[in-house]
Amino acid sequence: MQKKVLLMYISNNSGHHASSLAVENALKIKRTDIKILNINGANYTNPILEKVINKTYMGIIKTSPEVWDYLYDNPKVLRSVMALREFMHRYNSRLLKKLLNDFQPDAVACTQAFPCGMVADFKKTCAYESKIQLFGILTDYAPHSYWIYDNIDGYIVPSEETGERLIENGIACERVHDFGIPVDPKFQSPLNRDAIASKLGIDPRMPTVLIMGGSQGLGPIKNIVLGLDSLKNVQFQMIIVAGTNNSLYRHLKRTARHRKKKSVFFSYVDNIEELMEVSSLIITKPGGMTTAEALIKGLPILIVNPLPGQESMNTLYLLKKNVALKAKDYRDVVVLVEALLSNPIKLFQMRALARRYSKPDSAMKTAELILNSIEK
């Protein structure tokens, strides 16, 4: 009998989305006859609300980040929004019930807490849904309280510390699986560094600095590029990824001829594993997915402008493991890049630690757990 798995995330072109795609690919590798439906849970149940939430979130992050810092995983806020959360789940229940009844999944795996919570609530009240195996896949190193449900069958967590936090909040230890953030299995494949460098038009023998600002190209990337371009004591080249930030991409294109150092730039890319393969270090916001990918590739991480909440928590984890440095601002970025590129021993040590803490088989282990749960 054909097995079915429903994967749910929120926000297209996000780490949640990328992680769900990684699990999908791993499931297909493990079992070719499996049927998978991978959907944006928030957009499916309430597309208008999703747009409002995304717009509000980005507005807060850009203009009043301290507000998000207060709201994130705040017990007082959690208690005050419990009624609202329950109302939202009931409001979305008709479409979700139709989805589950039509697709009839054996398992549901969610890479974000909102759709996971909706399905968890369904499991409490509906006969069919109560039999579905439900998995929560955390894509940041600090689990917030919105993940806590007593009927989630398994949690896939990025680190041992993340799992301990869940257990402290009442989740049974046997339901917690320290597999890491699911990253596409292609990150494990060996790559030809010289061939990639040739395709990109860069020198494979020269140090390369990869500059990113998440999928939306956030942060002081313009100033970072300008500051790095002025460095004279170290030789390196730059790869710059603007993501969906069209304004940034147009700026990079317009100013390209004025840059002294060799640089290549892109908008949104789907070959980040290749860009990381040829890079010496990465300057980025510490989103969970970017972090997991960088660790697999053994890339030292230079953190700049972490978002409050989840990215601030990710930063604390990375600094504790000595796989990253944090810059106070774009000027500090320039100082730290010069120091790192002038100290190959430090770079080597950070690369070794990054690989030690990486979990390249996370997606495959997650797929195996899901399949084992529905094949019993």
Image: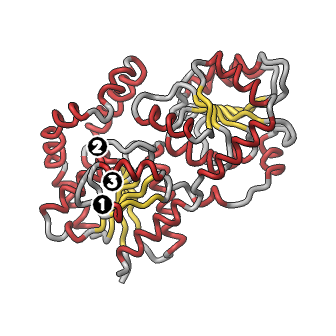
Q: Is residue 2 above or below residue 56?
A: below
- Find the distance from the CA under tag 3 to the CA under tag 1: 6 Å
* Picture quadrant where residue 351 is located: top right
- Residue 210 numbered mark, or none: none
- Find the distance from the CA under tag 2 to the CA under tag 1: 15 Å
Q: Are marks 2 and 1 in contact (CB under 8 Å)?
A: no
Q: Is residue 92 above or below residue 285?
A: below
- Find the distance from the CA under tag 3 to the CA under tag 2: 12 Å
Residue 162 left/right relative to 283: left
| x 76%, y 29%: residue | 263
The residue labelled by disc 1 is 172
The residue labelled by disc 3 is 167
Residue 98 placed where, x, y %?
20, 61
Helix, strand or loop status at disc 2: helix
Residue 176 left/right relative to 130: right
* Mark closer to the chain start, 3 or 2: 2
Identify which amino acid the numbered label 2 is placed on.
Ser
The residue labelled by disc 2 is 145
Q: Are marks 3 and 1 in contact (CB under 8 Å)?
A: yes
Identify which amino acid the numbered label 3 is placed on.
Ile
